Image (cartoon, rainbow, N blue to C red):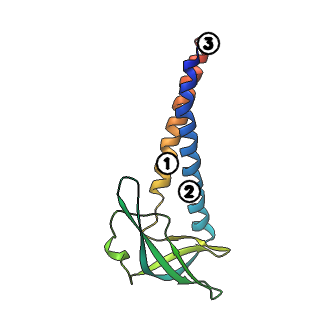
């Protein structure tokens, strides 16, 4: 058997990594949906970050008070290229947070599972497609 088949492990590895990130995000969102607590919060500022290509991403920073009276202020894990109308500084938002760890939260309407779903689908396609190709290659030798 030639060594060229080893190069097909690259998309398999990338697919598995994408799949893991996507599934982790979807499980996190499901856990928040199931056991999370909602609170009224406010956007106090936006953390602005630039990537290597120069694109700017705005992460809204929400503040809210937990049921046990703690004040929390954390940036969203998702950034967008522009700030939507209802998420400017001072906007009232609904926050769903984990009572055991309020750093795990989602701003309803801003944080969506779309990115996690895309990672899961791309990872599954890459992993499954590469695994099938490798299996066919091994069976036809």
Q: Please tell me whether residue 6 is drawn above or below residue 32 in the rendered image.
A: above
Q: Please tell me whether residue 87 is drawn above or below residue 10 in the rendered image.
A: below
* C-alpha distance separating marks 1 and 3: 33 Å
Where does label 1 land, which residue?
Answer: 119
Among the two numbered marks 2 and 3 on one chain, the one whose residue lies closer to the N terminus? 3
Mark 2: few, some, or many residues within 10 Å (few <14, many ≥20)?
some
In the rendered structure, find residue 131 and report the number of the disc placed on it: none
Regarding mark 3 in the picture, which secondary structure is present there?
A: loop
Q: Is the Cβ of the residue at disc 2 closer than 8 Å to that at disc 3?
A: no
Among the two numbered marks 1 and 3 on one chain, the one whose residue lies closer to the N terminus? 3
> Relative to the observer, which residue lies in front, 116 or 81?
81
Q: Position of residue 45 (x, y in %)?
A: 42, 78
Where does label 2 land, which residue?
Answer: 25
Closer to viewer: mark 1 or mark 3: 3
Mark 3: few, some, or many residues within 10 Å (few <14, many ≥20)?
few
> Relative to the observer, which residue lies in front, 45 or 102?
45
Where does label 3 land, which residue?
Answer: 1
Q: Please tell me whether residue 47 is drawn above or below residue 17 in the rendered image.
A: below
């Amino acid at each position: 058997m030639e060594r060229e088949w080893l190069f097909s492990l690259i998309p398999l590895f990338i697919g598995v990594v994408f799949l893991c990130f996507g599934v982790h995000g979807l499980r996190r969102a499901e856990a928040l949906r199931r056991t999370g607590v909602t609170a009224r919060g406010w956007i106090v500022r936006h953390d602005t970050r630039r990537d290597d290509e120069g694109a700017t991403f705005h992460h809204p920073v929400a503040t809210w008070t937990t049921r046990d009276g703690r004040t929390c202020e954390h940036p969203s894990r998702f950034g967008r290229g522009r700030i939507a109308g209802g998420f400017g500084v001072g906007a009232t938002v609904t926050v769903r947070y984990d009572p055991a760890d309020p750093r795990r939260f989602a701003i309803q309407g801003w944080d969506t599972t779309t990115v996690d779903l895309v990672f899961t689908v791309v990872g599954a396609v890459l992993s499954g497609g590469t695994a099938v190709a490798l299996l066919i290659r091994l069976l036809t030798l």
